[in-house]
């Protein structure tokens, strides 16, 4: 079942999604939160940092990381998390999981990551952003869904979209590690946040009703508990 919540704008989206996360943590203090990076969740993390909730028992698990970037590289997702989530929200070091962008063996790192999530008891709430091409995590459009955490070759669209965090598309790493579709779908609850007109087409595909690996977000139609929080621009006049 997909529940849709409409926000007027980006700021309201941050507040609405932030409240959903706060409610999750109130219900279960030691929640495992699957977290996303990028532009859309920044407003959520800002909202949470203002609220200063007690997240001392929360464990965080990230969706993805670029291959080849160290955690100290300001363009890595590790760095993003430190800057906007782990430190401002006082998440203990022992409670932070993210794939290692400098791992010597990607396959081994993916296996290790899956196992670490399993040991945590799975993900209670998975926060997702949405790619313009319909990706979730870095599960790019393709002929089939990839189940587990894996190494992915980023699509030209994704590298172009993310070049705003780098100098140019060429500087965006070619490869990343990402949770797989099954890893995401095993989360007990999913919160998809969508902002801006550039996402309207991908969001419309989700609302449209058919599941296809060419638009990975559509898999969420098969999940029993999905909330979509989207701003007016992303909804494109719908709802
Ligand atoms: C980030 C991630 C990606 C982004 C998506 C949207 O961890 O997994 O799927 O959520 O690319 O990014 P923004 O929010 O920057 O438009």
Image (cartoon, grey):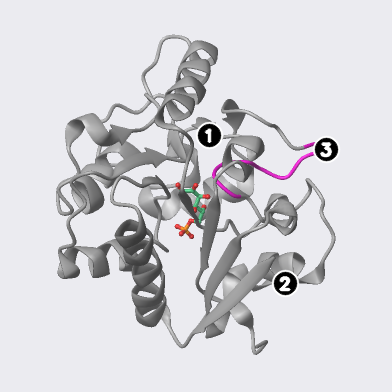
Corner quadrant of residue 100: top left
The tag earlier along the polypeptide, 3 or 1, is 3
- Image position, residue 172 (x, y; %): 45, 39
Residue 14 in magenta stretch: no
Q: Indicate the secondary structure of the residue bearing disc 1.
A: strand
**Residue 72 shows in the view:** no
Q: Indicate if the residue with disc 1 has its beta carbon within 8 Å of ligand 1.
A: yes
Check disc 2: other Cα within 10 Å, few if <14, some if 14-19, many if 20+. Answer: some
Name above or below for residue 217 compared with residue 233: above
Q: Is residue 138 on the magenta stretch? A: yes
Question: Considering only vertical position in the picture, is 214 above or below 143?
Answer: below
The rendered magenta stretch, by its main secondary structure, is classed as loop
The dot on residue 143 is 3
Residue 134, given in percent of the width and then of the height, sits at: 66, 56
Q: How far is the residue under mark 3 from the one under mark 1? A: 17 Å
Q: Can residue 56 be seen in this view?
A: yes
Quarter of the image where the C terminus is located: bottom right
- Residue closest to the eye, 190 or 66: 190
- Pointer 1 local density, CA inside 10 Å: few below 14, some 14–19, many at least 20: many
- Is 71 placed left or right of 14 in the picture? left
* Image point (36%, 19%), residue name: 102
**Range covered by the magenta-colored residues:** 136-144
Which is nearer the N-term, disc 1 or disc 2?
1
Numbered label attached to residue 204: 2
Instruction: Examine the rendered structure and indicate whether residue 15 appears above or below residue 94.
Output: below
Q: Position of residue 124 (x, y in %)?
A: 46, 47
Res 59 → quadrant: top left
Residue beneath disc 1: 178
Measured in 3D between alpha carbons, the distance from the residue under mark 1 to the one under mark 2, in whole angstroms, is 24 Å
Relative horizontal placement of residue 209, taking residue 31 as reference (left or right): right
Q: Residue at x 69, y 65 (%)?
A: 1
Tell me the SS state at disc 2.
helix
């Amino acid at each position: 079942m997909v529940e849709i919540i409409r926000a007027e704008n980006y700021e309201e989206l941050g507040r609405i999604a932030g409240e959903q996360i706060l409610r999750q943590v109130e219900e279960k203090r030691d929640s495992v939160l699957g977290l996303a990076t990028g532009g859309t969740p920044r407003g959520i993390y800002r909202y949470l940092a203002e609220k200063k909730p007690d997240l001392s028992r929360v464990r965080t698990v990230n969706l993805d990381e670029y291959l080849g970037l160290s955690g100290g590289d300001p363009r890595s997702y590790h760095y993003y998390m430190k800057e906007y989530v782990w430190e401002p929200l006082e998440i203990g070091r022992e409670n932070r999981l993210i794939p290692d962008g400098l791992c010597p063996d990607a396959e081994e790192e993916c296996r290790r990551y899956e196992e670490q999530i399993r040991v945590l008891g799975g993900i209670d709430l998975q926060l997702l952003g949405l790619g313009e091409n319909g990706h979730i995590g870095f599960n790019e459009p393709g002929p089939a869904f990839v189940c587990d955490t894996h190494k992915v070759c980023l699509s030209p669209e994704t590298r172009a979209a993310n070049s705003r965090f780098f100098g140019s598309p060429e500087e965006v790493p070619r490869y990343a590690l990402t949770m797989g579709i099954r890893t995401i779908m095993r989360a007990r609850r999913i919160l998809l946040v969508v902002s801006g007109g550039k996402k309207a087409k991908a969001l419309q595909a989700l609302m449209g009703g058919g599941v296809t690996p060419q638009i990975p977000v559509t898999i969420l139609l098969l999940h029993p508990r999905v909330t979509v929080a989207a701003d007016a621009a992303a909804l494109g006049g719908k709802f």
